[in-house]
Amino acid sequence: MKSDVDKLLEKNRQLNQLDMARVVSHVQREKDGWVLNTVMLDGYDVPFKYSRKKLYRSLQGARVNLTYYPQLEQVAGLDVEIMKVVRIRQA
């Protein structure tokens, strides 16, 4: 029987899976009624972003499993690569 992650990865080829990554920084801020979360991982210099309706406990120092896809975002007229998180679970 396939797990939920395997089903997601099979359905969309752009998705990537990262297991047991250590969170170096976790920032939460409000934007348009949502809480925008930005996570930086050990060994990666690209931000991983996702949104939630409510504040969440800090993931700093925790190990997480992520399902994400790369995306471009414009910041001050420059294209910056970010990782859009589809699924995040504490490992």
Image (cartoon, grey):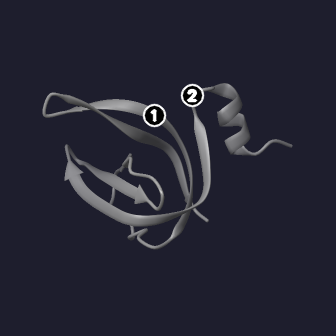
Q: Which mark is residue 14?
A: 2
What is the crowding at mark 1: few (fewer than 14 residues within 10 Å), some, or many (at least 20)? some
Which residue does the numbered mark 1 point to in the structure image? Answer: 70
Residue 71 lies left or right of residue 13; in this view the side is left
- Residue type highlighted by circle 1: Pro
Q: Which mark is residue 15?
A: none
Q: Say which residue appears at 62% left-offset and 26% top-offset.
A: 12
Q: Residue 31: where, in percent of width, then height? A: 20, 47
The quadrant holding residue 28 is bottom left
Asked if residue 35 is positioned above or below residue 75 in the image, the reply reads: below
Discs 2, 1 touching: Cβ within 8 Å: yes
Residue 17 lies left or right of residue 40; in this view the side is right
Q: Residue 67: where, in percent of width, then height? A: 56, 44
Q: Residue furthest bottom?
A: 61
SS at circle 2: loop
Residue 62 lies left or right of residue 8; in this view the side is left
SS at circle 1: strand
Asked if residue 9 is positioned above or below residue 89 in the image, the reply reads: above
Q: Residue 42: where, in percent of width, then height? A: 47, 62
**Quadrant (top left, top right, bottom left, bottom right) of the N terminus:** top right
- Residue type highlighted by circle 2: Gln
